[in-house]
Image (cartoon, helix red, strand yellow):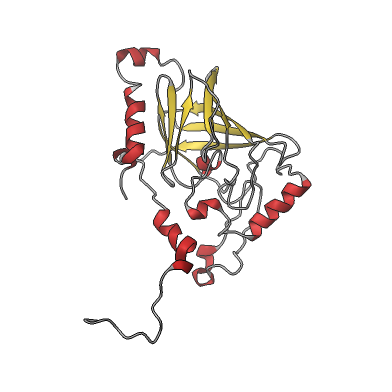
Amino acid sequence: MQRIMRHGVMGVLFGLAAMAWTGPAAAAARTHPDFNGIWQAVNTAYWNLEGHGASGIDGFMHDMGAFASIPPGQSVVVGGDIPYLPEALRQRDENRAGWPRADPAASCYMPGIPRANYMPYPFQIVMGEDEIMFIYSFAKANRVVHMTERSDAPIDYWMGWSNGHWEGDTLVVEVTANDDRTWLDRSGNFHSYAMKVTERFTLVDENHIDYEATIEDPETFSRPWTMKMPLYRRMEPNMELLEYNCVPFSEPMLYGDLERKAPRNAAPEDGQ
């Protein structure tokens, strides 16, 4: 694996953000909590935001035994259940039946918000004077939170469009223009083009963030709902964000049926 900060657009964005928050003047101006660092969720929201028991994956990877099973987990949804509209609930069930191929993340598409924050991979927050960067290892995803020049998105994005502000010591991020092809977890929970996510990051202590995300989507849900979970600072002394380039692993699933295969009775080429 290679370091994200040294490659392509990720390196450029990280460098710009870092330059924006250096020097004595910047240090003196830092009056808000310091979220700089590498963080990770430790729960089963990645599999299913709602409470769920352990289960197998029908017709999938039987030779892997327990390694292909889904671990049990508690709900991170306030109130326990996601308030789907009836038609949307049927769509959720269809999504679930089509997993894993139906899951956009299986194709190495960027996971979207809020899902990127509770995948089982670390992500990095870099605070700048006018912008805050979130850099994710999975699929080289990233997003910029606009803190001073708030604006509307010109188009929809896989990672949405983030405008932020402070409410006391809590970082509040409003994410709009979310591409409706992203899911909320591996269990088929989804949203429409109308989704707005309001995130709240509160630093409890040096190594813990209270994370909340309120979902508003009248096309999919009967009312707004909220998920809550802690995020933990990665404490390893040599911790760094590593690049998870998942494209090579998704290509066989996406294009395997297009692979040219030699006939069984074909004669070997010269030299073989």
Is 38 placed above or below 110 here?
Answer: above
Which residue: 41% across, 71% down? 260
Q: Quadrant of residue 176?
A: top right
Which residue: 49% across, 32% down? 208
Q: Is residue 126 visible?
A: yes
22 and 12: which is toward the camera: 12
230 and 91: which is toward the camera: 91
Which residue: 51% across, 42% down? 116
Residue furthest left in the image? 271
* Place of residue 248 in the rendered image (x, y in percent of width and height, measured from the top left): 39, 57
Looking at the image, residue 168 sits to the left or right of residue 13; the answer is: right
Looking at the image, residue 59 sits to the left or right of residue 31; the answer is: right
* Place of residue 52 in the rendered image (x, y in percent of width and height, measured from the top left): 65, 53
How many numbered marks does the figure carry? 0
Q: Quadrant of residue 251?
A: bottom left
* Place of residue 124 in the rendered image (x, y in percent of width and height, measured from the top left): 41, 36
Looking at the image, residue 99 sits to the left or right of residue 32; the answer is: right
Q: Is residue 239 visible?
A: no
Is 216 placed above or below 257 here?
Answer: above
Looking at the image, residue 4 sits to the left or right of residue 179; the answer is: left
Which residue: 73% across, 49% down? 89
**Position of the C terminus by quadrant:** bottom left
* Place of residue 193 in the rendered image (x, y in percent of width and height, measured from the top left): 63, 39
